[in-house]
Amino acid sequence: MSPRSVRLIALRVIRQLRRDRRTVAMIFVVPIVMVVLLGFMLRAGEDKLTLLIAADDPAAQPIATLAAATLQSADLPSAIQIEPTESDAGYQRLRDGDAEGMLLLRPGADPRLVLEGTRAPATEALTRFAGQAALLLRATTAGPLPAGGPSPEIEREFIRAGPELDLVDGIAPAFITFFAYFFVFLLTSVAFLRERQQGTLERLMITPIRRLEIISGYMLGFGFFALLQAFVVVTVTILALQIHIFGNLLWVFLAVVLVTLGAVNLGILCSTFARNELQVVQFIPLVIVPQALLSGTFLPLGGMPDWIIWLSRAMPMTYAVEAVKAVMVGGSGISDLVVWRGMLALVLFAIFFILVSARTLRRA
Amino acid sequence: MDAVALTDIVKTFGRLRALDGLSLNIRAGTIYGILGSNGAGKTTMIRLIAGLLAADSGEARVLDDPPGRPAVLARTGYMPQTPALYEELTVHENVAFFAACYGRRDPAAADSAVEFVGLSDRSDSQVRTLSGGMRQRVSLACAIAHDPAILLLDEPTVGVDPALRVQLWGRFRDMAARGATILVSSHIMDEAERCDTLGLILNGRLLAEGSVAEIRARTGAADLEGAFLALAGSVDEPA
Ligand SMILES: Nc1ncnc2c1ncn2[C@@H]1O[C@H](COP(=O)(O)OP(=O)(O)O)[C@@H](O)[C@H]1O
Ligand SMILES: [Mg+2]
């Protein structure tokens, strides 16, 4: 080991890297973006759940209001927000995803817990909480609630999904969409970078082929592979992980195709700003991680500050994951708001990226 | 009739004037050789004619239209200085692909272009398995498969062995005889002797233009090499 040789190599590495301004910038920008975003989200990310309290008989509504007040003042150790409501309105709010559960008080019987159902952790937390709440109510509320006797039997009702739903079921939709997005992005950006580097893109640009034809061809070619990949990933997750699918897979594949269209064009766009494969790889944390964090898959966005919600709404993958999840877990179809709104958003994002990437394919 | 007409073309890259008031005309059906040392501006000029670069100022006409018009593009063949090919595709697939981009979907067009460059026996080899000279020839085949009226060849015979080079030049002659206009850049002087007209460029300017005999006569040099050096030496290097 000669220190001089080591120094020689080290100096060359430093000099080379210094000339690659992009890489140097990335070394600082990427961790800063990640750390700040992740920090904010983890801090703000205490999951806020809403439990509605209602009576199944309108005549007993005052009891529900009283029970809600009791629970609110009971200072139960939980981040669950209690709100009294009427049962019809409560069901509607559950269907809208506006609340996660509703405790339905029934004269002369144990309360029934109605759950939105598509989020396994929320279901679990509310079930636990409902047990405590029922005990407390039994001890403090007179009237139609039965006093004494065995510990309350809480019957559960699911609006969507069901008791068999677990954590993996909730995450699988995100994996399927992100795989399609990630691989198509990576494939296109590298393929396009190579088209640029090896000069074939220039060659193509001066044939009578149009820019939109080149882009569409890429979308079709990679869309084919993305669809194939989605088939395999979905089949394997269903068979190996035994995930539960509550909706029609057709909509899942449609979402994957739409994600692919956006990803192809994002790849074309990013390839313009990359001089080599290394620089393409540098885009990965920027185009993947923030979207994964903001998609609501790993950290629920419920209690996040507004700017994080807005940021999340500006990202295509949020809509994709939301729609695929609604189909797979929530059993929704294209006629449901989350699904069609998600698809529409993906179409709009794809059109936007197509227009932008077409602009990067200029002749002179 | 002029197939290519450049008037006072200026093209800068930052502070560098790659083309500095270049004017030249290429008669249809002739072979025009553009000669110049490395960095003289040959590639820049060819890319401009091909429609890949826009001039900062000056006027360019190709087949009576500005370069880059769809009608012009369809009738132009461009062979870049470094072979631009898909490595994973075979020779024939590359040639057929570009021919099809020009609307020639007939496989025979690709076959005859591959034969033209003497690669029929490697037609089904993937390009990544070929030598440098072979790639150069595949790249040439890609430029001619659609029978262009104007053929732009940027140093087409670099890395091609002498026997084949002679053969290729014979074929260029045939194409010109059938009405094609060919612009060839080169820094190889013996190759230049085969052109109808020569243009010598230096620092983006046309130094001299004429037939081989004219240029030799003008400088009194015995060969083109000498003529070129004499002409280049008579120009003051810009500061
Ligand atoms: N894309 C570019 N960016 C910056 N400078 C360039 C670019 N292309 C060419 N040049 C410069 O323009 C000059 C002419 O280049 P070129 O036309 O390739 O010369 P030749 O083909 O005659 O060797 C050279 O000095 C070269 O460095
Ligand atoms: Mg050159």
Image (cartoon, rainbow, N blue to C red):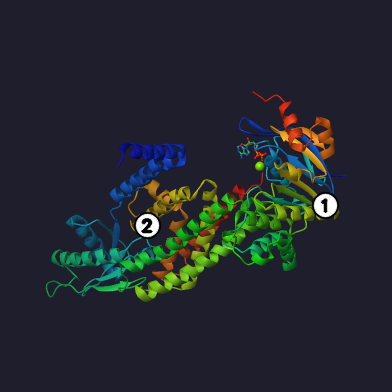
As shown in the figure, which amino acid type bears the numbered disc 2?
Answer: Gly
- Dot 1: element: helix
Residue underneath mark 2: A296
Q: Is mark 2 within 8 Å of ligand 1?
A: no
Residue type, numbered disc 1: Ala
Depicted B119 relative to depicted B81: above or below: below
Q: Position of residue B147 (x, y in %)?
A: 78, 58
Residue A216's quadrant in the figure? Answer: bottom right
Q: Chain of mark 2?
A: A
Q: Tell me where residue A33 appears, x and y as whole percent.
A: 38, 44
Which residue is located at x 35 percent, y 39 percent? Answer: A5
Quarter of the image with the N terminus of chain A is top left
Front-lying residue, A314 or B136: B136
Which residue is under mark 1? B176
- Specify the quadrant that holds the C terminus of chain A: top right
Percent position of residue B44, x then y: 68, 40
Residue at screen point 57% across, 50% down: A197
Residue B9 can be seen in this image: no
- Position above or below: A5 against B151: above
